Every structure is written in structure tokens, then in C-alpha cells.
């Protein structure tokens, strides 16, 4: 059997396949796993003001996080923002991805570029643009007040809504591109077969398109969810100083408070929450649709 | 089951007309084949009947129902695709049950009809398999069962056999035809495969450039092709260009004077001759039209010999003779006598 079977990867028998994964593995090991391990060790250390970090083996940093309602609220807010953004990306991204996937125009590639366009603009640039457009003295409020439609400027900047909109704007392209490539792999005539068998558009979507697109939906939601959970620049720039999410909180502990053990603990709580929620969603979806 | 009528159906995209004034009446239980070269509009016509392409103008009725403006899911047309288009995430039974489920057929009746449909296509016992676990021929039969289970008014087949290998194609061809007869299904099939069309159809529609060139039985199309295109498309024909030289006379470009019953009227025209109607040697001497011809090329095809000859500088033609014992194929450059009867040819006005 084994002699007749084709190689799953070119060069599998010569050990070349092993060599192919080496560069990425080394990079991930040095760049990610190592620092995470060190960070985890730090999170078990003690922080004594004035002495910086003191070697120890304690869970007090974790206890501090879970017993303080301020930190719990930050976690809750982060999860809420990430879930809302992911759902919004899915709802807005699916129709767009579907149209792009089914499009046969020669402008298709151009339109895909347009979807990616928001990513060409950095977070800082976008935030600056928004301040001029949506700030209390920005173009929108100035126009509305000039027209006499409102008396006081509408608060858009430095609210949770601003952060939500900002994260959706950044994450939407990831969702659209992921869904588009999966939907493109679903033959159009499978949809037509469903129609000819008496399924209206809603039934076709529910019974055929959605289940077949599920791998893409999972990949897209996981990607946007992780990005939203860990967002840093958008909450800082659009949320303002009073709006806290987990990403900025971690950075604050390291850079401003110099409390590395607590920062490490928050990092681990954020990472664990992201992984647990992602895996849970994955399992629920798989159980329902398979 | 019901009759289907297509009236003055037209589809254009901007300046491009892909289906041009197509009118076809299909009787209840009839097997009609749309045949033509690729790009002739046959598939677009089928897709308009199915409801996937909105016609630019014209009318479609199934039975007494005007379905022109109905979406596909309200037309009750069973459709079998070239690529089968099975639902990959559903089992064979779920695929076949899909149409019934959409029609809210009760569970008990649904499973009975699924079993019946699978029995018809000889796939009893495959209920729990997934499409990826089936061969191409089996997938094709699941697609057919899925279309049949919902008891469609009209069955539409879009090149259903072209993804199967040659031997399987012959078998499935007969199976589909038997099933269609047994169930009395009004059926339209689209194909570019002439042999498939000729063996399966009750009637054929030859299309070219969006237009119907001729509708008829196999015999009508072969014996009385309506125009030069049909004469060349259904079977083979030898064409001689020239002009009508009075009643019953045809003069070729190369100056040959041919007695031809079909030559009436006047003007430049083309004479079409079926290659197997042309006699060779002693047999040819007795024909009203017989000529010395130079062999250009001969091919041995087993049961037949294909011989390309030239009668003059401008007149070349193809003939076919049966491969009887003792007949050697003529060599290039050899001169042979060929001939044909007065009523053998058909004359068409020359196309611009």
C-alpha cells in the first residue's frame, strides 16, 4: 500500500517536506512562543511598587483581575465589542462577498481591490480623518448645526459606537475576502438546482448556500473576532482616554504602570478568553450543521 | 406532465441576440432535443424555460399556465445539469427528498417517494451515501432521481451525458429514454452530440446563431434538410457550388452539367449530396449523372470507405462506399467513375 500511494507532499520521502516547514516554525517559535512563555512566567511574579518585579510564584495578579469590577468590565466590554463587530461584519460582509464571488465582470479584480482599500489607510490616519469629519467641531456637526437641524453637536467621537464603527471598517475586508473565496468555490448551478427543486431564495440560502459556505463563515468570523478582541489603535484613537479595552489595558500596565506581572496576567486572560470563545463558537456551529 | 409551448422567445444582451424568435411546441410526453453547435442558443433557450434567464420577449407556457414571469422555484421544471449539481453536504436520500421537502410533502410520503425514485434509477440502498462517495454515473442517476421525485411538469436535461465516459453514456442514454417513456415525461434535452440526439429524440430542433433552423424527426432532418446548414450539420453532405441552369438542371462552378430534380427557379445555388447516395464504378455508369473523378484522398473507416474526389478544378466532393469484401480503397491520383440519381441531390440558394 505505502509504496503505491502517492506522496501527499512533494518530497515527503526525502525529508524535504520537513525542511519546508522549518523557516516558519523557527520564526513562530522565536517570535511568539518564546515571548509568551516568558510572559506567562512573569504573570506569576509579584509586583512591589518601587521594587518593580519580584520573583515569585503566585496567582495574585489573576485574582486581582477577577475580583476588581473595573477590570471585569473592561473584559466584558471587549467581548461585547468583538461580538458586535463580528456579527456586523458577517451581516454586511456576506451579501458583498456573495455579489463579488458571483460577479463575472472584468471589473471584478478592481472591486476586490476597493474592498481592501480601507486597509491601505492606517489607523492613525483614519482616526485623524474621523476627527475632522465627526468631531464635535467636525464637518458633519458643523453642517447640521449650520442648517439648524440640531442645537448641540452629536457625540460620535470617543464613544463605544465610534470604536464599533472603526473596528468594523478595519475588519470587514478580512471577512469579505475570506467569504468571497469560499463562495466562489460553491458552483452556481448547485444554487440553481435548489431553485429548480422549488426552493425560494430564503430556503436556498438556509439549506444550501449557508451550510456550504460554513467553512468560510467560520474562518471569517474567527479572524474578525480575534482582530476585534485584540484591537489596540482603534479603541485608543476613537474611544478616547476613558474608553478601555483589553489591548490598551495590557499596554498601559507595561508602559505606564511598569507593572509587568499584572500586564502579563491580563495578556493571558485576553488570550485565553479569545481562544475559549473561538473554540466554543466553532463547536456550537459544528454540532448544529454537521 | 404537460405540454410546453415556447412562443417567439427572444433573448438579447445589448446588441447581441443569442436567442432569436424561437417557437417550439412540445407535446405531452414528447422527448425533444435541442441540437446545435456551441453558442447556437440552445442552452440559453433551456435556461429560459427553467426560469434562470429572463426572456427579452416571448411567452412560455406549461400546460395552461403562463410561466413567462414565474421564478424558477414556481415552475415545477425538473432539471438535470451537466455537472449534476448535487448538494455535497446532503446524502443521496436528502438530495432526492429536497424537492419534496420544499413542497412540504409529509415525512411518510416523502420517504416512500424517495425510495421509489431511487428504485427507478437503480440506486436502492445508496440512501445514506454522500455524492463524493459515488461514481460519475451514479451521481448522474441521483441527479435524475432528484428531478423525478418532485414529479415535474417538464424535465429539462442540460447535456446530461457529456461528463460520462463513452460506454456509460450509451447505457445511461437508453436508461433515460426508457424512464422518460415509462413515466410519460415531457422532456427537453440540450446536446451538441449528434448521435446522442438522434438515438434519444422523438423530434429534434436544430439551432444555429440563436435561430431554429429546422424542427422534425430524425428522418425528416436527414432526408429533407431545410437548408444548407442542416444538410451539413445532420449527417454529412458533399456540397457543389454553382447555379440553377433551368428546370431540372444544375451547373457547377467547374462547368459540370447535372440533372437534378430539385433544381427549380434560378440564381446561384448549392447542390447538396449525401455521400452514401453516390455510386462508384459499374453501378455509376447506369446513373443519369456520371463523371470521371480523380481520387484525392481515401480513408479506411472499417465499415465504410471515405473517399474525397475532385471532378474539376472547382468541384470537390466526398463519397462513402460500404466496405464490401474485395473492395480495395482507391489510391490518390487514380481515376474512378462516380454517379448519382436525378433525385439524389437537394438544392439550396447560395448563402451570402
Image (spheres, grey):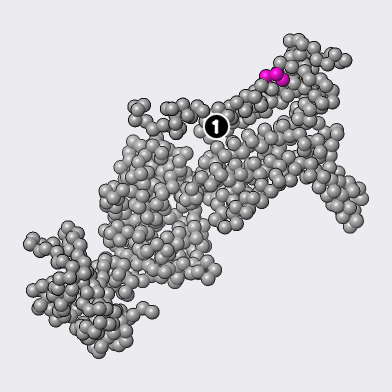
Q: Position of residue B7 (x, y in %)?
A: 43, 69
Toward the viewer: A199 or A35?
Answer: A35
Residue matched to label 1 = A286
Toward the viewer: A49 or A58?
Answer: A49
Number of marks? 1
Where is B195 relative to B277, above or below?
Answer: above
Q: Is residue B149 visible?
A: no
Q: Position of residue B250 (x, y in %)?
A: 24, 84
The local secondary structure at tag 1 comes to helix
How many neighbours does mark 1 have within 10 angstroms: few (below 14), some (14-19), or many (20 or more)? few
* Range shown magenta: A36-40
Where is A28 relative to B54, above or below?
Answer: above
The residue at the far bottom in this view is B246
Left or right of residue B30, residue B291 in this image? left
Q: Is residue B227 visible?
A: yes
The residue at the far right in this view is A151
Residue name at image x 73 percent, y 34 percent: A231
- Is B258 colored magenta in this rendering? no
Left or right of residue A112, residue A54 in this image? right
Q: Position of residue B229 (x, y in %)?
A: 33, 71
Q: Main secondary structure of the magenta part?
A: helix
Q: The residue marked by circle 1 belongs to what chain?
A: A
Residue name at image x 33 percent, y 40 percent: B123
Q: Quadrant of residue A272?
A: top right
Where is A197 relative to A276, above or below?
Answer: below
Where is B95 relative to A30, above or below?
Answer: below
Q: Position of residue B74 (x, y in %)?
A: 49, 55
- Is A37 colored magenta in this rendering? yes
Residue name at image x 47 percent, y 50 percent: A189
Amino acid at each position: 500500500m505505502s509504496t503505491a500511494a502517492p506522496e501527499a507532499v512533494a518530497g515527503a520521502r526525502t525529508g524535504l517536506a520537513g525542511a519546508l516547514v522549518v523557516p516558519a516554525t523557527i520564526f513562530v517559535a522565536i517570535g511568539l512562543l518564546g515571548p509568551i512563555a516568558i510572559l506567562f512566567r512573569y504573570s506569576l511574579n509579584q509586583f512591589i511598587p518601587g521594587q518593580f518585579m519580584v520573583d515569585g510564584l503566585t496567582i495574585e495578579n489573576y485574582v486581582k483581575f477577577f475580583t476588581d469590577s473595573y477590570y471585569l468590565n473592561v473584559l466584558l466590554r471587549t467581548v461585547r465589542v468583538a461580538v458586535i463587530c463580528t456579527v456586523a461584519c458577517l451581516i454586511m460582509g456576506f451579501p458583498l462577498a456573495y455579489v463579488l464571488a458571483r460577479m463575472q465582470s472584468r471589473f471584478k479584480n478592481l472591486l476586490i481591490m476597493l474592498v481592501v482599500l480601507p486597509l491601505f489607510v492606517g489607523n492613525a490616519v483614519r482616526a485623524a480623518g474621523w476627527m475632522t469629519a465627526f468631531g464635535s467641531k467636525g464637518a458633519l456637526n458643523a453642517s447640521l448645526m449650520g442648517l439648524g437641524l440640531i442645537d448641540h453637536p452629536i457625540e460620535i467621537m470617543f464613544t463605544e459606537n465610534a470604536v464599533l464603527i472603526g473596528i468594523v471598517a478595519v475588519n470587514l475586508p478580512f471577512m469579505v475576502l475570506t467569504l468571497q473565496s469560499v463562495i466562489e468555490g460553491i458552483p452556481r448551478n448547485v444554487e440553481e438546482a435548489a431553485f429548480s427543486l422549488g426552493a425560494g431564495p430564503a430556503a436556498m440560502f438556509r439549506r444550501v448556500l449557508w451550510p456550504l459556505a460554513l467553512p468560510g463563515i467560520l474562518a471569517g468570523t474567527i479572524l474578525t473576532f480575534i482582530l476585534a478582541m485584540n484591537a489596540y489603535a482603534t479603541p485608543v484613537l476613537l474611544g478616547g482616554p476613558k474608553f478601555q479595552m483589553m489591548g490598551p489595558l495590557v499596554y498601559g500596565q507595561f508602559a505606564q504602570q511598569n507593572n509587568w506581572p499584572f500586564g502579563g496576567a491580563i495578556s493571558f486572560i485576553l488570550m485565553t478568553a479569545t481562544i475559549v470563545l473561538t473554540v466554543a463558537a466553532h463547536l456550537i456551529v459544528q454540532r448544529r450543521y454537521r | 406532465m404537460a405540454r410546453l409551448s415556447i412562443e417567439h422567445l427572444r433573448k438579447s444582451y445589448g446588441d447581441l441576440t443569442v436567442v432569436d424568435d424561437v417557437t417550439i411546441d412540445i407535446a405531452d410526453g414528447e422527448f425533444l432535443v435541442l441540437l446545435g453547435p456551441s453558442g447556437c442558443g440552445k442552452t440559453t433557450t433551456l435556461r429560459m424555460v427553467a426560469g434562470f434567464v429572463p426572456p427579452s420577449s416571448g411567452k412560455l407556457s406549461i400546460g395552461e399556465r403562463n410561466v413567462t414571469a414565474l421564478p424558477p422555484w414556481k415552475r415545477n421544471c425538473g432539471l438535470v445539469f451537466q455537472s449534476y449539481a448535487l448538494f455535497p453536504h446532503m446524502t443521496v436520500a436528502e438530495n432526492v427528498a429536497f424537492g419534496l421537502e420544499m413542497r412540504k410533502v409529509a415525512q411518510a410520503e416523502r420517504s416512500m417517494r424517495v425510495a421509489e425514485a431511487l428504485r427507478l434509477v437503480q440506486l436502492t440502498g445508496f440512501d445514506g451515501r454522500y455524492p463524493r462517495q459515488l461514481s460519475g454515473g451514479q451521481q448522474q442517476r441521483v441527479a435524475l432521481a432528484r428531478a423525478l421525485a418532485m414529479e415535474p411538469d417538464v424535465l429539462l436535461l442540460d447535456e446530461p451525458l457529456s461528463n460520462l465516459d463513452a460506454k456509460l453514456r450509451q447505457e445511461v442514454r437508453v436508461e433515460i429514454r426508457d424512464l422518460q417513456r415509462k413515466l410519460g415525461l415531457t422532456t427537453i434535452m440540450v446536446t451538441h452530440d449528434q448521435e446522442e440526439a438522434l438515438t434519444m429524440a422523438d423530434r429534434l430542433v436544430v439551432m444555429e446563431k440563436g435561430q431554429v433552423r429546422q424542427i422534425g424527426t430524425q428522418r425528416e432532418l436527414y432526408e429533407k434538410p431545410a437548408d444548407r446548414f442542416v444538410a451539413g450539420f445532420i449527417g454529412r453532405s458533399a456540397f457543389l457550388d454553382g447555379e440553377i441552369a433551368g428546370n431540372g438542371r444544375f451547373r457547377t462552378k467547374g462547368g459540370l452539367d447535372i440533372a437534378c430534380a430539385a433544381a427549380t427557379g434560378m440564381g446561384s445555388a448549392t447542390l447538396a449530396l449525401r455521400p452514401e447516395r453516390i455510386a462508384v464504378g459499374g453501378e455509376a455508369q447506369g446513373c443519369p449523372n456520371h463523371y470521371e473523378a480523380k481520387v484525392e484522398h481515401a480513408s479506411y473507416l472499417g465499415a465504410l470507405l471515405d473517399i474525397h474526389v475532385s471532378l474539376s478544378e472547382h468541384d470537390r466532393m466526398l463519397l462513402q462506399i460500404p466496405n464490401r469484401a474485395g473492395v480495395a480503397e482507391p489510391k490518390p491520383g487514380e481515376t474512378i467513375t462516380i454517379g448519382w440519381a436525378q433525385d439524389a441531390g437537394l438544392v439550396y440558394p447560395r448563402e451570402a
